[in-house]
Structure formats: C-alpha cells, structure tokens
Image (cartoon, grey):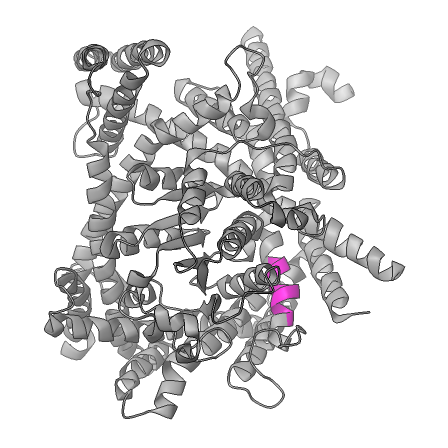
C-alpha cells in the first residue's frame, strides 16, 4: 500500500512481480479443466474444406497422414491428428501414416494411430492402415516417395517389409495417394506444399500450430493447399464437424480421460480474457505514468 | 589445394546441379533421373549420419566440462546419463542385441526400455519446456504491448481482434447487435485472408527470392563459409 | 504399482521440476534441463539407428550386397563427416559436407522459386473487376479506391508520407463498407485490390536499394501497416499456441497424474 501511495498506481502496476501474472495464468488453466464450461465453436471455411475433401473419398482411396510434430506441440497437433485419423477410419478410407519430424515425430505417429485404430476393431493393420514410422532425410525422403515409397521405407515401423503389407501393394507413390495431411509444427508442413504439391500435384492439407497458422493462410489463398487447421481452434472445429457427422465417435469425445481440443477451447477463452485484461491494465498504467510524468 | 578447396566446391556444384536439372525432365530421361534418384536415396542415409553429429559435439563439450569441474559440472553428468541410457537402449533395440527387441512398445502393450524413456522422460520434458512460454507470453503482453504510436496501435488492435475472434465467446461478442452474430469471428477470418495474407505473402516472396539467390551463390562457389572457407 | 503409474509419477515430477523455474532458478530445474538436453539426443540415436540406418543401409547391405553395393558410398560419406573431430584430417569432412549442402541447396532453390515465388505472385494478380451484371458498380468502387491510391502516392511524393497512406486506406474502407452493405460481389474485387497493394507495399518496404522517401516512402509506410496487421495476427495466434501447450501439461498433471493415482489407490 505504501508503495502505491509513494509511486502511484501506475508504478505499482508496472513493477508488479511477474509471478502474480504466472499464478493467474495457472489458475486460469486449471479451473476450466476441473470445471468444464462446454463452449461451442463455429466452423471456418479452411477447416470445412478439409473435412469435405475427406468426406468425398471412398473406401478405395488412400490418405497419407504425416506426423511432422513432436511432444512440444502435441496438445495442438495431437487432437488434429486424432480427429483426421478417426474421420478417415470411420469412412473406411485407407490410411498410410509416416513421420518426418526428428524430435519425436515417430513416437507421436505410433501413439495416435494405435489409440485411434483401437476404436475400430474391425479394421486390420496392413490392410486398412499402415504405420511406416520415422525417416531421416527431409526433402530427399519426400521427393523419393514420388518415385517409390518402398525405396524410402523398405519396412514399416515394426520392421515388416512393405511387400508383406497388402495395402502397400496398392500404393507405390504419390499417384496412388488422394490426399496428404501433414500435422506440422514447422517447416515440414511448408515442404509438403512448396515441394510435393508444387512438383507432384498431390493435394495437400496442413494442420499446423497456431504460431505458424498466419503464414499458411498465404498458401491457402493461393490454392496450394486444400484445407487448413490452425492451432487448437482449427482442431476443435474439426472435432465439431466430426461429431455432427459421426455420432458414433461421441463416447471418445465425452471421455474426460482423453484430452480433446473442444475442452481446450474453454481454457483458451479464460486465458485469452486474462491476457487481454493484462494488455488493458498495462496500457492504463502506461498512460497514467505518462500523464504523471507530463505533470511533473 | 585441389583436394581441400576445389574438389569440395566441385562436389557442391554437382550435387546442387543434379536436382535442379532433374526438375526440368520427365521420368523418361533416365540419364538425368537415375543420378537424381541415387542421390536422393543416398541423402537419406547421409542425413542420418549428419543428424547424429550434434551428439558427438555435446558429448565432447560435456566431458570437458566434467573434467574441468567448471560451474554446474555435475549437471553435465545428468545430461550424459540422459543421453547414454535411451541412446544405448535405442541402439541395442534397433539391432535386437541381447534382451532388447526393437524400440517400439512390445506386442502386449508393455513398454520397451527405449519407449519407456520416450513416454515418461522425453515427452514430458519436451512438452513442459515449451509450455513455460505460455507464462512468459502473458507477462510480455502485460509489459510490452503499449499504444506508443500508430504502428504499435495497429499491431495491438490486430492482436486483440484475433485473440477475441478465435475464442468461442469472442466470436459472438457482438451478437446483441442485429445481424452481429459471429461478426467478430467473420471479421477475424477476413483479416487472416486479406491483410494478413498480403503481409505473409510479401514476406514469403521476399524471403524466397533471398533464399534462392543464396542457393545460387552456394552452388556457384561464391558463398563458401559452410565449408569453413573464406570468400575469395 | 503398475509400470504405467511409475512412469506417470516420473513424468509428473520432471514436469514440476521444470515448472519450478517460474518461481525462481533452482537445482531441480537445472537437473531437469540437463536431462532434457541429454534425452533429446538419446532419442535421436535410437530413432535414426532403428528407422534409417538399419532398414535403409545395414539390412540392404547384409541381405543383398551385390544389389545394393552403391550404398557403400553414402555410408562412407556419412562416416567421413566425423573426421572433423580428428584435427589432422578434419578437412576431409568437407567432401561429405559439400555433397550434403550442395544437394539440399539445389532442392531448396527450385522449391523456393517454383513452390513459393511463382504461385504466390500468381495468386496476387487476381481480377479486380467483378462479374456481370454488377461490373459497373464494381468498376466504380475499385476505380475510387485506385484513384485514392494514386492521389495518396502523389501526396507522399510531396513529403506527406502518413497522410498519403491514410488517403488510400480511408477511401478503401469507405468503398469496402459500401460494397459490403449494398454490392457484395464488389467486395471481392476490393479485397483483391487490397491484397495486391498490400503485397507490393510490403515488398517495397523490404527493398532497401531505394531510399524510403517521397512516393517510395509512402508505399513503404503502407507496407509497415500491413506488416503490423500480420504481426498482430501472428501474436494473437502465438498466444493461442503457447496456451495450448500449457493446457496439455495441466491436463496431464490433473487428469493423468492426480486422477490416475486416485484411481489406482481406489482400485
């Protein structure tokens, strides 16, 4: 109190120990997890475009899902990956999973595919879906898959030669792939667009982290990609569309033990409000300080 | 001199030229496509070796730190333990040595030594380290986001509009105005598709032209710093 | 106690060690930070050995050496990278580095020009006049905004940089609001104009060979405004991204760790 009297409210606010801010952010994150609000999200065109594209596919079609993220952005990319995989498997569209992100991409691919595939006990590994695992090489691997996927991935993530997987008998290169969905934390999402879509013409959609979403709007506008999921909001929109079209997936999204993006948006709402509040308070303190300085 | 300078520059030129030339030919041009295919296949393996170069650097640096007993040297021991345990589990698992079979979880769902490290040490450490940024972004918004001038005001307004327009409550902030339902959400989408796209596109085109010209300098041997050589 | 629960406890304690930095720097954080760096590299070793070196190099050479003898070349080039750690022959690593950097540089050059510059430039040059039958109205509104752009540039050339930019932006906003209310199809044409102007102005801002004075200064000023809008949007999205990562950890601590332990105790 003495401090406030001495230097004024603006000084007190400007010198506020940042640990109070940290505490408020932590409380804002914890409360909505304990007491979900259940806010509904609206769907934007870039998300609907990807959903509609997968809706247009038949059980003979193959979608390639590339795990180009690691544990650092799992809360953002994970729900997207799960929703896209769930959508494909619910439609009986064939899925080829791979990972190109060195710091944890392979682990993410195995974790998400194993979890989602377990929800569809009638679908069989090797026939309906395949996990090729992680590969080094970046652009070299991606370009080589345009010629022959088996040259890049002689075996799948479990070491089984591709020649023993019935699905991979039908899929030789990008010509046999109807859509590539890259769940990306950074530059690899760009490569699918500016290398693979540009040179092979394969349709590409990207589920990116929120940080890189503004950049991907430029690719979306130039029609170099057919759909875009930007951050947790994009993931929550996809979950909404999936739930509306496939009520059978509802138990998964109702399960409090499984994290989903729609629940995450509750927390986003609270913390965004806190941060906007901080911006307003910070500016009020700034102007109070300026007017006081002008008076002095 | 030829071996140490000219030959590496020649190799860069050839390795860089092959994918560029191959781009202009179809698969039928075997004379061009075969070397390009080979190079791509080899590059996957070389990249595998290259990615592990960092490991040697870190091990060397930390062993030196322990030997000198410099400040915080005991943390270097934990770093090396953290590196050696999953690294050796991974190597032994990859080549099925002794009781180690693969690096994935076992068929019965139980974790392999490597996958245990991945799930319960690697993943939480990676995820938590980056989640700390949420706290600092809030602190930065409080301390640095000021309406100082016109440019700063534009930046701040765009940030607030996007922050509000991308959360469920904010999207319908103007629902009380007739026809205002989802107005902010729609405006945010417009902002992303138009002014934001213009800015991102300008940056992208500028950066891509810069990267392409740098690539040309590398291939032609003008830029040599990556080989530890000075420019002529 | 199941192995999963033991693992969850290890993960939770490591999470708390890192979070402790928010209060202040301390030995628990330093320990977890060191482990973080080490384990990340250990992960590389396992992944690369299992997923690249074994299936793409070792097994093909072991099973069919004659059919894959060419793989000896990348193996030697890869191993040769490590000669940089032997001072006497460190220069030899240049051969491998040259091939590695050369290849990716070549790929990158084509990728940037064909995959970014050309399509992005193409998408910027969109039709400014809308479809029949409202072509007249569209032409009128677009001409109005374009005229304001020219007038703004003339004003900038006379030294009024900000005023020149304001003339264009304010006229464009009026035309766009009119279009939104009365002529929706004209709105697309105006958006295309804005996009075109925005891209050109941002590029001019980054073009440092010309002094940013007069009309160029006015265009550069407008470019900064576009950039600020873009950076502002990026900041908004960055907040969402960072918060998402925090949600993930909080969710783990509450649901997986505390919830999991309570369930395990409760049987």
x%, y% of residue C36? Answer: 59, 62
Between B178 and A61, which is closer to the camera in this rendering? Answer: A61
Where residue A193 appears, as percent x and y from the top left, is: 32, 50
The residue lying at 68 percent from left, 55 percent from top is C15
Q: Nearer the viewer, residue B200 or B51?
A: B200
Left or right of residue C222: residue A4: right
Question: Which quadrant is home to the N terminus of chain B?
Answer: bottom left
A85 up-or-down from C231: above or below: below
Extreme-right residue of the structure: C266
Give the residue at x 53% y 18%.
Answer: B181
Quadrant hosting residue B7: bottom left
Q: Could you tell me which quadrant the C terminus of chain B lies in?
A: bottom left
Image-quadrant location for residue C81: bottom left
> Above or below — where is C85 with respect to A213?
below
How far across and down, in percent of the image, does residue C51 sit? 45, 75
Q: With B53 as the anchor, is A116 left or right in this view?
A: right
Q: On the rendered structure, is C195 left or right of B133?
A: left
Magenta residue check for C194: no
Decide: is C73 above or below A169.
Answer: below
Question: What secondary structure characterizes most of the magenta part?
Answer: helix
Judge from the rendering whether residue C155 lies leftward or rightward of residue B103; answer left or right: left
Task: For residue A259, say whether it is visible.
Answer: no
Give the magenta range: B116-125
With respect to residue A296, does C28 lie above or below?
Answer: below
Q: A49 and B201: which one is in front?
A: A49
Q: Residue at x 67, y 52 (%)?
A: A258
């Amino acid at each position: 109190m003495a401090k406030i009297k001495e230097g004024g409210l603006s000084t007190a606010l400007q010198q506020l120990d940042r640990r109070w801010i940290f505490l408020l952010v932590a409380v804002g994150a914890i409360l909505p997890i304990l007491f979900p609000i259940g806010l509904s999200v609206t769907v934007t065109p870039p998300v609907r475009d990807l959903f509609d594209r997968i809706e247009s596919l038949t059980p003979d079609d193959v979608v390639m899902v590339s795990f180009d993220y690691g544990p650092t952005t799992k809360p953002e990319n994970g729900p997207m990956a799960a929703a896209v995989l769930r959508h494909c498997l619910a439609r009986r569209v064939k899925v080829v999973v791979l990972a190109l992100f060195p710091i944890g991409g392979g682990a993410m691919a195995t974790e998400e595919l194993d979890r989602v595939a377990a929800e569809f006990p009638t679908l069989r590994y090797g026939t309906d879906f395949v996990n090729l695992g992680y590969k080094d090489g970046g652009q070299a691997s991606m370009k080589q898959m345009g010629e022959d996927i088996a040259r890049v991935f002689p075996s799948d993530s479990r070491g089984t030669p591709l020649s023993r997987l019935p699905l991979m008998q039908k899929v030789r290169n990008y010509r046999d792939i109807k859509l590539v969905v890259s769940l990306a934390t950074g530059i690899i999402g760009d490569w699918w667009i500016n290398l693979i879509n540009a040179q092979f013409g394969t349709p590409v959609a990207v589920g990116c982290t929120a940080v890189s979403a503004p950049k991907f709007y430029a690719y979306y506008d130039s029609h170099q990609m057919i759909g875009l999921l930007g951050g947790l909001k994009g993931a929550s929109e996809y979950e909404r569309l999936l739930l509306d079209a496939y009520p059978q997936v509802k138990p998964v999204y109702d399960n409090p033990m499984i994290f989903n993006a729609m629940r995450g948006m509750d927390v986003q709402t609270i913390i965004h409000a806190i941060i906007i509040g901080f911006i307003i308070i910070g500016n009020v303190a700034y102007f109070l300080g300026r007017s006081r300085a002008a008076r002095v | 001199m030829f071996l140490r300078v000219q030959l590496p520059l020649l190799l860069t030129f050839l390795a860089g030229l092959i994918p560029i030339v191959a781009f202009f030919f179809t698969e039928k041009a075997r004379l061009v496509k075969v070397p390009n295919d080979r190079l791509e296949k080899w590059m996957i393996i070389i990249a595998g070796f290259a990615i592990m170069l960092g490991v040697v650097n870190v091990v060397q640096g930390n062993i030196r730190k322990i030997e000198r007993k410099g400040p915080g040297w005991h943390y270097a021991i934990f770093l090396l333990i953290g590196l050696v345990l999953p690294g050796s589990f991974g190597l032994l698992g990859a080549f099925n040595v002794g009781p180690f079979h693969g690096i994935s979880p076992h068929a019965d769902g139980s974790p392999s030594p490597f996958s245990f490290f991945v799930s319960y040490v690697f993943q939480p450490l990676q995820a938590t380290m980056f989640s700390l940024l949420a706290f600092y972004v809030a602190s930065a918004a409080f301390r640095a986001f000021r309406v100082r001038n016109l440019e700063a005001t534009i930046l701040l307004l765009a940030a607030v509009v996007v922050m509000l327009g991308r959360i469920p409550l904010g999207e319908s902030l103007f629902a009380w105005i007739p026809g205002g339902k989802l107005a902010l959400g729609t405006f945010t989408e417009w902002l992303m598709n138009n002014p934001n796209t213009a800015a991102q596109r300008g940056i992208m085109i500028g950066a891509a032209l810069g990267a392409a010209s740098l690539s040309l300098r590398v291939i032609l041997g003008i830029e040599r710093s990556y080989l530890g050589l000075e420019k002529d | 106690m199941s192995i999963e629960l033991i693992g969850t406890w290890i993960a939770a304690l490591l999470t708390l060690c890192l979070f402790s930095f928010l209060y202040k720097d301390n030995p628990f954080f330093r320990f977890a930070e060191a482990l973080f760096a080490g384990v990340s590299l250990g992960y590389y070793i396992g992944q690369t050995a299992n997923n690249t070196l074994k299936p793409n190099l070792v097994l093909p050479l072991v099973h069919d050496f004659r059919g894959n003898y060419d793989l000896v070349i990348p193996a030697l080039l890869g191993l040769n990278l490590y000669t940089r750690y032997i001072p006497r022959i460190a220069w030899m690593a240049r051969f491998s580095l040259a091939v590695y950097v050369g290849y990716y540089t070549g790929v990158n050059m084509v990728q940037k020009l064909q995959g970014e510059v050309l399509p992005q430039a193409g998408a910027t040059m969109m039709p400014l006049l809308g479809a029949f039958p409202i072509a007249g109205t569209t032409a009128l509104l677009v001409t109005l905004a374009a005229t304001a752009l020219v007038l703004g540039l003339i004003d900038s050339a006379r030294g009024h940089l900000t005023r020149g930019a304001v003339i264009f932006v304010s006229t464009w906003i009026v035309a766009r609001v009119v279009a939104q209310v009365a002529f929706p199809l004209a709105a697309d044409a105006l958006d295309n104009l804005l996009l075109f102007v925005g891209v050109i102005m941002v590029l001019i801002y980054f073009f440092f060979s010309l002094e940013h004075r007069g009309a160029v200064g006015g265009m550069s000023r407008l470019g900064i405004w576009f950039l600020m809008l873009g950076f502002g949007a990026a900041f908004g999205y960055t907040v969402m991204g960072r918060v998402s990562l925090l949600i993930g950890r909080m969710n783990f601590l509450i649901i997986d760790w505390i919830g999991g332990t309570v369930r395990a105790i409760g049987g």
